[in-house]
Amino acid sequence: MTPELFALIETLTAARSLPLNGYQRLIEARCPESAALLAKQAVQARKEIYGNTVYVRGLIEISNFCRNDCLYCGIRRSNRHCQRYRLTPEQILACADEGYLLGFRTFVLQGGEDIFFTDKILCELICTLKQKHPDCAITLSLGERSRESYQLLREAGADRYLLRHETADRTHYQSLHPPEMSYEHRMQCLQDLRELGYQVGCGFMVGSPGQTSAELARDLKFMEEFKPDMCGIGPFVPHRDTPFRKEPAGTVELTCYLLSILRLIYPPVLLPSTTALGTIDPQGREKGIQAGANVVMPNLSPVSVRKQYELYDNKICTGEESAQCRDCLDARMRSIGYEIVTSRGDIKTF
């Protein structure tokens, strides 16, 4: 490791900040030694706040209908090979009931931008969930909606909202999305969510087509300035029915490197070790935790529909029952010295 790289890591650890060109240099000049040092510092920063605990979120994939046509996504509206499904509110509540018995105290309702799920339907669903399980947190990950919609959902009881910004570079954003979507609107949605009192999560793909180190540096700078409560990053994994089908996947190595940097930028952040990491490497989720992540999200969706919520090829855990999924992750985390906890898992700030 060069003295320059060591100095950048020392500055980041002490100041929680680097200039834009410092982040870019940290990425471009990375080596096994710098990755090991960053991971060591990141794990230490996380342990000072969260100890050896890993939070679990119960993921319920409510629909794979989507009005958008993002070029990287397997459930894009123009994919005629996608077998569409939509869970009923009763099915969603049954998934949450099962998850509650398994110890989950946060439920993540994730889906495409499905026009079926109006504010009325979602508000009734959220209210019922809160009545049945008042000690639980509800996280929504349902894409771009109006500020008024976000406000109604918040008033109904939603606690958190995950909306990955995908890239903090305007030109790169447009290269990944259809013309009717805009970088400005995505960023406005994130600002609206914060102003409305949500715990807000954003994030980006690592290794998405056309991505440069300069663009990744902008992502890191955006995270530093926005300070999200949650940040979901994972490697780009191509899907066979998208325009990016022949593009190479992102890597576990770079994803874990960036996880460590994100932990050092904002130590309290809730960082998932994603299913995409586990998809491209059998030990990917463990490597994410060892790089500084502290959240995993077992799937509570009905087994019958899990293979249909296919954002990318070869997604793991599509055939396991919810209890199996939970037990598997529990064992995996214990094998590397971590303990799954079933609390709401709110961000800890000091």
Image (spheres, rainbow, N blue to C red):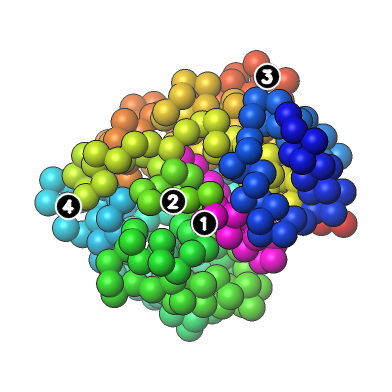
- Residue 241 occupies quadrant: top left
Point 85% across, 54% down: residue = 15
82 above or below 332?
below
Q: Which residue is mark 3?
A: 336
- Residue 218 occupies quadrant: bottom right
Residue 265 in view (yes/no)? yes
Q: Residues within 10 Å of mark 2 (few under 14, many from 20)?
A: some
Q: Which residue is mark 4?
A: 79
Q: Position of residue 170 (x, y in %)?
A: 45, 69
- Distance CA(mark 3)–CA(mark 4): 39 Å
The reply to whether the C-beta atoms of the residues labelled 2 and 3 are less than 8 Å apart is no
Q: Residues within 10 Å of mark 4 (few under 14, many from 20)?
A: few
Marks 1 and 4, the one that precedes in the sequence: 4
| Callout 1 amino acid | Glu
Q: Which residue is mark 2?
A: 211
Residue 222 among those drawn in magenta: yes
| Callout 2 amino acid | Gln
The nearer-to-camera label among 4 and 2 is 2
The answer to which of 188 and 171 lies nearer the viewer is 171
